[in-house]
Image (tube, grey):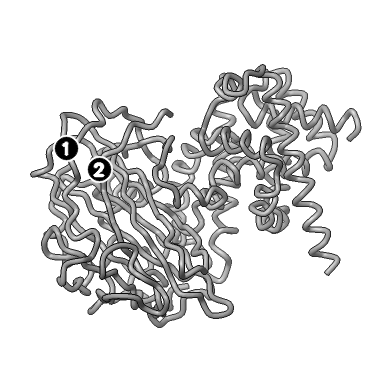
Amino acid sequence: MPPADTPHHDAEDWFLRQFVQAERELLRAIMSLVPNPVDARDVLQEATVALWAKRAEYDPTRPFAIWACGFVLNQARMFLRSEARRRARLGAVAEDLLAARREELASDLDARRDHLQACLDALPSTQRKLVRGYYFEELSVNELATRVDGTVEAIYKALQRAHAALLQCVERKLRMERAG
Amino acid sequence: MNADQNELEALATAWLMGQATPEQASRLGALVEAEPAARDRLLVLADLHACLMTDERLWAERFETARLEPARPVTVRRRIPAALAFVAGLLFGFVPLVFGYTRSEPKNSVAGPVPVVDGDFESDVAPGMTGLADRSGVWSGDIAALVTGPQQAVKPFSGQRMFQFLRSDYEGERFTRSATGEVLQVIDLRGWSRPAGPVAVEVSGRVNAVRPSAGEEYRWVAHAFALDIDPTTRRGEPDYSWLYRECLAAAHQPGVLDDDDATRWQRVALEAFVPESASFLVVSFGVQRTQPAPTAEPTNFSGHYLDAVEVTPTTRSRR
């Protein structure tokens, strides 16, 4: 945190640096309610307005990312309500429950993320190529289907299985870690 | 996996990928409302999706192979309406790092080489150590050195010389609570042979470091800012936050973890958007100590090197 006698300008610079460092985590949190990354970035932009306006209320003894997470999740809920007519929504109650639970699960999700790289590397080659194609190469499901000469439905199923395999691997590593 | 969990995972996958119908989304919402375990499972799946989608570190080879191909979306920041005044000025100042963009298609991706000067650090011109330089075409930033030949088992990526980061502050800097050592170059684009319209460029550099001490972790960062004002006239600014505020477009590489292997040069790259009205491009490379946390003192770097900086026009991203 900046020293108490930090000039105003430096305090803003410090806030800015904290924000830049937390940006990835904030985007992650938003995507728990708004999974489309383009929409999620729009939400983050709006949330940043709120964050900046409230920066004087920030208690620097609290971790910045945790404090900011509350803002961005609230912004995500507001976004979903404003976009209700043109989106397939889970429903306001479910969204509120998820937002509240997301904050409670933050440290568990961080622990899971720490094992993701190893589990991604351990995926069978076919699954890894598929995950890489969708998430890194940003190929659409249709493009992936064309690439492997398969159907769109089959790609969805395969991605679902890849997600499940990754989560299984992460959970196995977590159990081993906790067992010492 | 039982039938309910199977249904949940199928619905969740469709929802995460934007393919769920309103009925499917509603059904997923009902499952989440009714069952705390379903709530947790959806959050875990959504976080997996988010990490895979947004965490470039998971795809580290991306920065170590020859090209960003296919690339991320090329984006340009909206110009800030004057009416937004203070909040917008400060706020959107750092928003363009990652968002706040209007998508715009470059009309033509063919352009001549971007005139970065001494990208291979082979000249004997020592880098400036007073922050942003007072002229274009020179390297300047935090306290650093130009070194010749192998250093602590790190050999230059190419040629005889390489750039060495030494500290996270520059001479006369007021804000020293930083763990990032940076070097910047202002590139004057006014003589650049370029087609009409916006152009995408790839900014890349090679980075390497000695093995860190126990408990230390470093990552490599890079930034690019396109401007229609001459940044060298702003040299008196106390920090670089004005760059975020006043740029036309910006891009950043938020952090490639150092691989702890002094024998291997990693590649750090980003794709930046250069609007037609941009006359200057500021490129910046840096090393950030992420563990342990910064103290009140500037951070010293024990053996962190940069070489082979290039700025090249690139092909257009697909989406």
| Side of B114 relative to B33 (left or right) | left
Which element carries disc 2, helix, strand or loop? loop
Tag 2: residue type? Leu
Q: How far from the left and from the top, in percent, is residue B192?
A: 12, 42
- Between residue B232 and residue B28, name the one nearer to us: B232
**B99 to B143, vertically: above or below:** above
| Side of A45 relative to B238 (left or right) | right
Q: How far from the left and from the top, in percent, is residue B223?
A: 33, 54
| Side of B287 relative to B111 (left or right) | right
Q: How far from the left and from the top, in percent, is residue B125?
A: 15, 71
| Side of A24 relative to B245 (left or right) | right
Mark 2 nearby-residue class (10 Å; few <14, some 14–19, many ≥20): many
Residue B299 visible in the picture: no
**Could you tell me which residue is drawn at 71 percent across and 29 percent down?**
A158
Residue B205 visible in the picture: yes
As drawn, which residue projects farthest toward the right? Answer: B2
Q: Which residue is mark 1?
A: B277
**B292 to A37, vertically: above or below:** below
- Between residue A122 and residue B10, name the one nearer to us: A122
- Label 1 in the same subunit as label 2: yes
**Could you tell me which residue is drawn at 12 percent across and 38 percent down?**
B193
Identify the chain of the residue marked 1, using the numbered disc in the image.
Answer: B
Q: How far from the left and from the top, in percent, is residue B40?
A: 77, 44
Question: Residue B273, located in which quarter of the rendered image?
Answer: top left
Please give the label number shown on residue B248. Answer: 2
Whether the residues at callouts 1 and 2 have beta carbons within 8 Å, the answer is yes
Which element carries disc 1, helix, strand or loop? loop
- Between residue A151 and residue B275, name the one nearer to us: A151
- Between residue B139 and residue B41, name the one nearer to us: B139
Question: Residue B272, located in which quarter of the rendered image?
Answer: top left
